[in-house]
Image (spheres, rainbow, N blue to C red):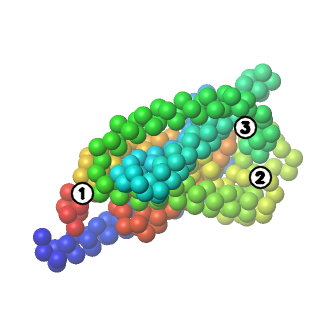
Amino acid sequence: MSNTTKIKLGINKMKKENKKILIVVAVFAALLILGGIFDESIAKALTNQDSVWATIWQSYGMFPSKLLPFIAGLVVAFAAFHLPNNEIRKWIQIAGGFGFAWLSAVTYAKEALTYTAIMNANIADKLPLGKADNDHANALVIPFGKEMLIAGIIFVIGAALAYVWLRNKTPEQFKRLVIVAIGGVAVTFIAPEIVDTMKGAWGRFRPYEILTYKVDGAHFTSWWHINGNNGHKSFPSGHSCQGAMLLYLPFFIERNKFKLQKIATVLCGAYAVSMMFSRMVVGAHFLSDVATGATVTLLTIFVVTRALGMVFVESENELKA
């Protein structure tokens, strides 16, 4: 293939990536317009804090933000096995990678057990199943042994699956995967920081604070109204931000497996949408909240992957560029 052809294919690849991000921005803008008009009406129609499936998504659905660093740690650890045994870096990388994966498993175990405790308390107190006090959840005492047991199960199963996936990878393949892993960790740190900063600044009341519990002073404000740091954190949605992180998974798939990349993208996208919808059903967020949370993640993925020279879904011709 001539250099001219490679340049043309590279330009086409960039144009397609830019087109994808423009579509994301256009959809986001449309959802913000709809939210500006119908946020309150949609919340009144959908809110049901006794929804079982929405509560399950609320309690256990933020796993993508722990899954990406978990996979990243395992990739870094297994990649080190290709290094010479006499290099100290090998053993540091193995210990660091497995340690990072372990911390991710522990974080998810604690989060899942905390939400489980909240659900059990709601049932015992005859409160709506989906009532969750995120700001005071950390006050719950989670049994250390149970936390370690759940984390251990996650770690062992995840490490075994990673071994099956990575055992035949070449050093060159690992080189790409390590770059993907670094990008994934960056996404899981950057996007939530943006969302948390916006939550504090906007101070928007949640639908259930307005409609279900009628918290003192709670009132509806449109997404463009910045209330300041008042302790209320509806805009944007953190769950939607973290659910959309699953869309980073296709980057871990080998670049020549085009069909699998597309299937994974569709499935991960469907999950992200289901998370967004569940947050509206459980009364935790308005349409504009979930749209913004997910879009922050998508834009972060775009910026990070563009900086690392990665493309979302390859095509056979583009891969040759």
Secondary element type, mark 3:
loop
Judging by the rendered image, the residue that carries numbered circle 2 is 232
**The furthest residue to the left:** 1
Q: Is residue 244 visible?
A: no
Judging by the rendered image, the residue that carries numbered circle 1 is 315
Secondary element type, mark 1:
loop
**The furthest residue to the right:** 216
First reached walking from the N terminus: tag 2 or tag 1: 2
Tell me where residue 315 appears, x and y as whole percent. 24, 57
> For this view, does 258 lie left or right of residue 203?
left
How far apart are the two marked residues, 1 and 3, measured between alpha carbons?
Answer: 44 Å
Q: Residue at x 46, y 36 (%)?
A: 158
Query: Would you place residue 52 above or below residue 239 in this image?
Result: above
Q: Nearer the viewer, residue 226 or 153?
A: 153
Judging by the rendered image, the residue that carries numbered circle 3 is 132
Q: Amino acid at mark 1?
A: Ser
Mark 2, other Cα within 10 Å: few <14 / some 14–19 / many ≥20: some
How far apart are the two marked residues, 2 and 1, measured between alpha carbons?
Answer: 45 Å
Quarter of the picture holding the C terminus = bottom left
Q: Residue at x 80, y 39 (%)?
A: 139
- Callout in the foreground (2, 1): 1
Q: Are marks 2 and 1 in contact (CB under 8 Å)?
A: no
How far apart are the two marked residues, 3 and 2, measured between alpha carbons?
Answer: 13 Å
Q: Which quadrant would residue 278 be assigned to in this image?
A: top right
Q: Amino acid at mark 3?
A: Ala
Mark 3, other Cα within 10 Å: few <14 / some 14–19 / many ≥20: some
Q: Nearer the viewer, residue 159 or 289?
A: 159
Query: Would you place residue 229 above or below residue 80 in this image?
Result: below
Tell me where residue 4 appears, x and y as whole percent. 16, 78
